[in-house]
Amino acid sequence: MSFSLAAAAPAAPYIDWAGLSPLLALLGGAIIALIVGLAGPRAIRTQIVPLIALATFGVAIGCVISLWGQSIVLIEGALQLDPLTLILMLVICGGGVIATLLAWRDQAADDIAHGEFFALMLLGAAGMFVLVASRDLVTTFVGLELLSLPLYILCAARVREERSLESGLKYLIIGSVGSATVLYGFALLYGATGQTGYTQIAAAITSNGLATDPLFLTAVAMCTVGFAFKASLAPFHQWTPDVYEGAPTPVTAFMSVATKAAAFGAIIRLFDVALRPAVESWRPIWIALALITMVVGNVGALRQPSMKRMLAYSSIAQAGYVLVGFVLVTDLGVQAICSYLVLYSFGNLAAFTVVIARERETAEGDNISALRGLGSERPLMAVVMTISMLSLAGIPATAGFMGKLRLVEAAAGADYAWLAAVLVVLSVISMAYYLPVIATIWRGETQPGTDAATGVPVLAGGAPEADVAHGRAGWELTLAGVVLTVAVLVFGIVPQPVFNLVASAARGLGLS
Amino acid sequence: MTIHLSIILWLPAAAGLLALLLPGRLARSISLIGSLLVLAYAVALLVDYDRAASGLQYVTDVVWIRSLGIHYALGVSGLNLVLLATTAVIFTASALWTLVAEPDHGKPGIYALLMGLAQTAVIGAFLAQDLILFVVFFDLMLVPFYFLIVIWGGPERTSAVLKLFIYTLVGSLLMLVGAITTGVLAANGGEPNFLLSELAKTPLGSDAQGWIFLAFALAFLIKMPSFPFHGWMPDGYSNMPIGVLAVFTAILSKVAAYGFLQIALPLFPDAAVRYQELIMIVAVASILYGSAMAFTVDSARLVLGYSSIAQLGFIVLGIFAFDGRGADGALLQATNHAIVAGALIFVVAMLSRRAGGSEKLSEMGGIAKGAPAFAAVFLVFSFALLAMPGTANFVAEFMILLGTFETKMTFAFIAAIGVALAAFYALRFYISAMHHRVGAKVSSFELTLREGLVLVPLMLVVIALALYPQFALGPAQDGTRKALSATQQVQSSGADTSATTDGATP
């Protein structure tokens, strides 16, 4: 191997720039945002920079669409552009658009300067692209770090708030432990197989009969633990509620959708491609992880007064559901994961939208009491929150139901109906924390001090100077909330477009 | 391919939406007009339905989710024809009650929308001819009731509704897994198809049928509720607003009973036969437990709640006798009980108005004095509840017991005790509310015009059914024979050697 490399002419690898265009767009946008963020007038910094971020995510989505249907290997096998990459990039960039809207007037963006804030967000998204497209251990690790480092900073973006700093620090420490574990696992994997490319690793496992080799199994175990940290799977989830609660809420929203999509993309590629020959060695561990994650997430979310902590545990539970699709290692399973990630993101982001609106409108922060009386005070936001909770709970006629339906169908088709049964029974627990939120919205009386009769048009508060602390949340939140809610209902009733979108998700993986 | 069923399905939801959008003072009237239109449509279907023909009529079948093979398929058969009309009657009564007899509770537009959605979901569950569509509507039924109870319910609504939701969802989500597994296994690696008619052609293996049948049975038994799955019932019933409770107790439990005939027996015949005695034990236990509790509780609502458990026990018993007459009786009893129980819920509200706002039997008494017409109407419903000979309830219970007697004599004997117990609790209910010593806070008055407007039409339905039960039984026979044919096949192939007279039913 090393011989042939030395003998070959040191030609630069062929690079398909068109294939890399989403990545280039995100990186370019990050640099532009950083530069514009240095501009003098505050209006440019606070208004133009988010617009640039929005435009960048838009361009990246455009690039993804223009590449739709392609299956190509980029940069000599470092990255793979296939339907899985493109679908997950759509989720990530879509999450980015919403997160940008949510962060538009957020205190966090003000605290560390708008240029830095949005540039970091775009860099994080670029890291997610590398991560989901990677088909090589080294690239995977680069992507993992490119994704993690900006998020550590973003979590601590509210520099004057202890909670946020604590969140960033905690994420940094735990994230580094996770990264180190992954790196250790990769090193051992390389030691066991002598390869870094995913397909070559798979070939080496088969030809050398490594599936039960102790060194190899140690490597698999390290990778599993490392990725479990990153994807916040129980019992490696303890950081998640603290980080979610402390981080600025738009960042939390971004993490809960985009980071999750990216982490699962990486997990699917590493385990379904590179480690597939040893599937029987790692499947039981992942089934156990799925069960523990579903239990811990659903039980942990009970009786949480903080909405962000509740949504953190709910996102752990959702990760557990996704794992049910993952352990099947089938084409349908990957399709189900992708449709779940798409369908679940609408309701999840809508919930965060309302939480942010209430953080800005009341002094209660993300406490559930901030939602009391929402039904009479802000009917539109109350409907958004209600539908998003129903979707997260997986009630029929919402997108969340269709996502679960697909997972259950994939599990039943792969003879894992028992796992699907466990999934639905545990998801019943989730009613006990989603439904009280709805009850609070519609039952609770308006708090004293706030004006119950605000019959103001929903688009009020568009001017930035009107956006004082505990004023009215901006129109962009209403817009985001309504669009997401409509998506929840439309895809809850007509899910076929999403199913068409993900139909080829597993094409690049060679699964049955 | 007709559009009629889609219209009747979505009409209530559309009316609810209209009520929400128009000024609040019109909401209740629009809700009533919507449910009257549905009733008119249902009656038209009842008249137009070809009783001589067999099988589904007015079929609508469009592919809904192509990649999962799920159809938007609706159809009317002998099984759901009368239940559809019953649904329309009860929802109309509830809308009428809300319009004429309920004080303003606020947010009438939202109330109208939720009731409309509830009716759409119930009708959808009755009409669905696709397994997943049925499950979706079955689960969806619950959602409007969550809001109806949370916003307008009694003092312990939040915990009551959570209990209700969790109980019923455990059942119905397991049912969802079972339904999907059914389709996937029946497809045998090919494209799944969830049409009931297709699924019935390829029965599953006996092992898979076992747990899937139990999942469906659990969902249905919780929804009814049956003993011992009734844990949500006391709190749930106590905290529902009257108009909502009438619909809930009258109709939702019948969807579950209908589910056994429409889904569980035709699709999982092996398992149904295997677990026949288990389900019959549950049914008989429900009859005895429900009757005993109805005889002892003090709350008038819970008397009806527990009597529902007993009555639904009879219905399940009739279905699981796997005898045509038993199933016909069960279907007739489903309609009877819906009308009678719904009406008696309104009677409870009227009693409570005459007893100083209390719904406790111990604080009522002597209400008949000064309200003879009310007493007469109440007595008609009480006689129907206890299945007095002459009422359709008597016909239905007689057929259920006859069917059970033919196949499982022991169960019939025990269940017959329940008939006697029904007389005990129904008469105790009537006597302790209407006669006895006058309660401390009781100030009785005659049936008002508004109350009469709700009760008298329901009473006329009861009387009409009593005079001509064949009206409901006629179309039912074709439906029940089809529903039972698969299980009877399994039974006869299993009992070939025992040379019994199994062929008593066609």
Image (cartoon, coloured by chain):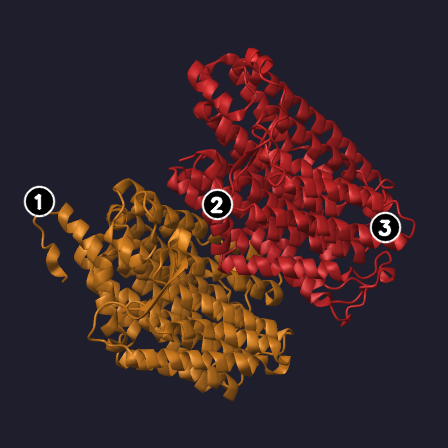
Chain colours: A red, B orange
Q: Find residue B106 and report its horizontal and vertical position in percent.
A: 65, 74
Q: Provide the residue designation for mark 3.
A: A45
Query: Pointer 3 and pointer 1: residues touching (CB < 8 Å)?
Result: no
Label number found at residue B497: 1
Q: Find residue B151 and report its horizontal and vertical position in percent.
A: 62, 65
**Mark 1 burial class by Cα count in 10 Å: few <14, some 14-19, many 20+:** few
Distance, label 2 to label 1, CA atoms, is 43 Å
Pointers 3 and 1 within a single chain: no
Q: Secondary structure at mark 1?
A: loop
Task: Identify the amino acid type marked 1.
Answer: Thr
Between label 2 and label 3, give the one nearer the viewer: 3
Q: Find residue A147 and report its horizontal and vertical position in percent.
A: 69, 35
Q: Residue furthest right?
A: A40
Of B129 and A180, which appears nearest the observer? A180
Of A195 and B40, which appears nearest the observer? A195
Pointers 2 and 3 within a single chain: yes
Q: Find residue B122 and report its horizontal and vertical position in percent.
A: 43, 66
Task: Identify the amino acid type marked 3.
Answer: Arg
Of A234 and B307, which appears nearest the observer? A234
Give the quarter of the image for residue A312. top right
Q: Secondary structure at mark 2?
A: helix
Q: Provide the residue designation for mark 2.
A: A424
B272 relative position to A162: left or right: left
Query: Pointer 2 and pointer 3: residues touching (CB < 8 Å)?
Result: no
Give the quarter of the image for residue A379. bottom right
Above/below status of B105 relative to A246: below
